[in-house]
Amino acid sequence: MKLTNVLAWSSALCLSGAVIHAQESSDTEKLRQQLKQLQESFEKQQNEMRQTFERQAREQQAQIDALKRQLEAIKTNPPPAVAPQPGARAITPAELPATQPSSSPQAAVRPWSPTDPIRLMGGQQNYISLSFDALFAAGTSTANDIDRLQLGGHDPKQRGFTIENLETTFEGKVDPYFRGQANIVLQIDPEGETTIEAEEAYLEAMSLPLNLQVKAGQFFTEFGRLNPTHPHTWDFVDQPLVIGRFFGEDGLRNPGARISWLTPTPFYSELYATIQNSQGGTAFSFRNNHEDEPFFGLPNSQGRVRDLGDMLFSTTRYAASFNLTDAQTLVAGASAAFGPNGTGDDADTQVYGVDLFWKWKSPNQHAGFPFVTWQTEAIARRFEAAAFPGDVVIPALPRETLYDWGLYSQVAYGFKKGWVAGFRGDYVTPTERARYEEILGERDLDRASRWRLSPDITYYPSEFSKVRLQYNFDHRNGIGNDHSIWLQAEFLLGTHAAHKF
Amino acid sequence: MKFMLSKFKIAWLFAAFFCAATAQAKLNVVATLPDFGSIAQEIGGERVKVTTIAKGTEDPHFVDARPSFIRVLNQADVLIEGGAELEIGWLPPLVNGARNRKILANEPGHLILSPTIRLLEVPTGPVDRSMGDVHPVGNPHFWLDPENGKIIASRIAQTFSTVDRGNASFYQANLKTFNDRIDKKIAEWTRLMEPYRGTKVVTYHKSFEYFAQRFGIEIIGQLEPKPGIEPTPTHINALIPRAKEEGVKLLMVEPFRPRKTPEYVAEAIGAKLLVIPEKVGGNEKARDYFSLFDYDIAQITSALRSNQ
C-alpha cells in the first residue's frame, strides 16, 4: 500500500513539474502529449501493482487455508504426548472429583512458542499485574492565576489541554509473605516538560500474626478517605481544597512504615499507625522548604533535625464500618498527624481530621447501579510558626500559633448504568487573621478563606473509560469570584485493580 | 498512661482469643455466592456456619467490598470462591485486608471452584477488551448446571474434610446424601424439560449458558451486544428479525436487569419474558440450590406450555 502511495505521489509531482515546463514553452500540443504519456505510464504502473498485490493475497490465502487444515488434523488426532510445562501445576486425576467427566480445558496446555503474544494477565501464571491509566483534562477558567486557583498537582492548571496523570501500576504477590505495589506517574507540566514521579512503591506483609499488617516503602499516608487514593478513583476532576491546603499539591506521602491492626470488635474497625520522613514537598505542613518561597510570611527550611523525632512525622487513624441495612454502609474515621515543621526549632504541626462515608447501593443492582454515596471530610491544622529574626527583605516576626480548618462534602448519584451525577462543596479558612499578616501589612492569600461549588456529571462507557464534565464556582476572599469548566477523559489498560470500599 | 494502654490492649487480645476459641466450635465458612453457600450448608450441616458475600438479588460481577466482610473473612476457616475472574472486582481487597493465613491463596482453606469445572466459551483466539467483558478463562456462571453442582459439592466436602479432619466422615456422608438427592432431582428436571428440548431462547447476559446446555435449550443471542455492554438500538434491531426467524419462544432475564428493553424485545418477537433468578436468593422462592432449579424449571415449563 505504501509503495502505491509513493508511486502516486511521485507521479503527481512529475505531472506538476511537466505542467510548469509546458506553460513556460507555451506549446499546448506538446503539453497534451506529455500529459497523455504520463497518464498512460501511471495507469500501467497502477495496473501492475494491483495484479501483483492480488496474486500475493491469493497465495497467502492458500497458505492460511493449508495451515487451517493442518491445525484441524492435529486437533482430531492429537500428538501422542504434550510435555507438561515445568512449574505449571497440572491437575492430577486423583485431585479431580469422581463425577468429573473429563479433564478441564485448562489442563491441556500447549507449550509456549515465541510467536505467541505475551500476556501479563489471565491464564494460570500471574507474577505481575500491570496497568496503565491516563487522565486528561481540557477546559478554561475566568481566573488569571489558574495555578493558584487549582491546588492539586493533578488538577488542570491551564486553559486548553492538561495531561493530568499517566500512571503505571505494578502489582503482585512477591512471595508467600509479601504483596508489592508500585505506581509510577508521568505528567506533562505547563512548560511542556515531562516529569516522572515515584508516587508509591511499597510492600505489604500478608501473613503476620495477631491481626497485624505492615506496609513499608513510599506510600500515601493513611489520613482520611481521599488522601490515600489515586486521582483516577476520584469523583471529581480536581482535588478538594482542604487536601491541597494542608497536604499540598501531591497529597501527604513519604517513605516510611505503617502498622495496622484489625481490632477484634464485632463490627469492622481498624487502627493504623504510620511513621514517615518529615521533610519535602510531600510532607507539606511539616519540614518543607516550600521551594524557598515564604510560607506563612517567613522562609521555611528542611534543615532542622535536633533528634530522631524531628526526622519523622507520625499519623494515627481509626476507622470503623457499620452495615446500616442490607443496602447501606457507613464508614467513619478519625485521623491525626504530628510532626515538626520547617519554620524553626521547636515548631511543630498537628493536623486532625474526621471523615464519614455513606453508601446506598440497590440490593438489585445491575452493573453496580443505581447507587448514592456521600463523603465528607473535615480537617483542622495547628501550626506553630517560629519567631523570625528578620532579614533585608522580611521584617522580624514573633512566634505564633496558626489555626486553619476546612472541609468538603460531596454526593454522587449513579442514576443509570454508566451515569453518575455529583455535587461537591469545599470550604477552607483560617480561624483568625495572623500577626505576621498584620506586620507584613497584607493578607496572605494562600491562607485566606475561600469556597467552591462543583457540580459534575460522569459517563463511564465501561469500567475502563470515562468522560466527565465539571463546573467550578470559586469564591476567594481578597480575589473574587471565578468560573471554571473542565472536561476530563480517562482510559485504563490492563488489570483494573479492585477498589477498596 | 502507657501502662494503662497496654493493659487495655491485653484485655482486647484476651477478648480476641476468646472469640477465636468459641468460633472453633463450628467451621466458619465464607462463600462468595449464595449458590456455593447453599451447597456448603448441605455438606456442612449444623457443623458449619456459612456467610455469603454476594446477595442473590444483585449482579455478581459488581458486588461491593463492604468492610464488614473483612471482619467476617478474618474469622473464616474456609473461603469458597467461583474463580474464572467472577469475583476479581471485589474479593482481592477483602482477602488482603482479612489478615487470615488460612484463606490466603494456595492454602487448604481457600477453595477456588473453576479449575476443576469444564468451563464453556473458553476463548480460542486472542482476547481483548474491544470484545467487551470476555472472561479469558471461560464463562464463570457455571453453577447453573446441577452436574457442576455435584463437582462443587465434592470439592467442598474435600476441603471441609482437609480443614476439619475430625468431621471428615460426617462431610462425606452428607456429600453422598447430596449426590443421591441431586441425581434424583436431575432426572426429574431433565424429564420436565424434555418436551421443550431445542426450544430457542434469548437472554440478557451470558448467564444461562450452563443451564441451557444441561437441559437442551438453545440460546440464540443476548440483548447485550457484547458481554457487559448495554443493549444498543443497532444490535436490538438486528436481533429482533433473527429471533423471529428462529422462532424464539422465551426471553430469560435475571431479576436485577432493567426491564424496559427486554419488554420491548419480547413484545416485538412475540416471545414470553421470563424474569428468573440465576442465583440462590434471587427471589424468595429460590431459597437454596434445589429450589432454585425447581423454581426456574417450573417457570420455564409453564411459560412454554401456555405458549404452545
Image (cartoon, helix red, strand yellow):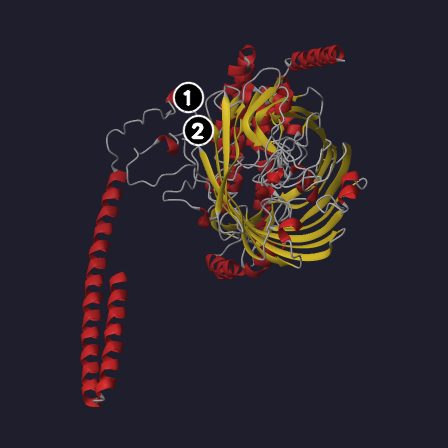
Q: Amino acid at mark 1?
A: Glu
| Chain letter belonging to callout 2 | B
Residue highlighted by disc 2: B116
| Front one among A278 and B187 | A278
Q: Amino acid at mark 2?
A: Thr
Mark 2 touches mark 1? (CB < 8 Å): yes
Taking B60 as reference, is B150 above or below it? above
SS at mark 2? Answer: helix
Residues under labels 2 and 1: Cα distance? 9 Å
| Front one among B13 and B252 | B13
Residue highlighted by disc 1: A95
Question: Is residue B75 in view?
Answer: no
In the image: residue A422, left or right of residue B274: right
Q: Quick one: label 2, few (<14), some, or many (20+) residues within 10 Å?
A: many
Residue B22 drawn at (x, y percent): 68, 13
| Front one among A308 and A152 | A308
Q: Quadrant of the N terminus of chain B?
A: top right
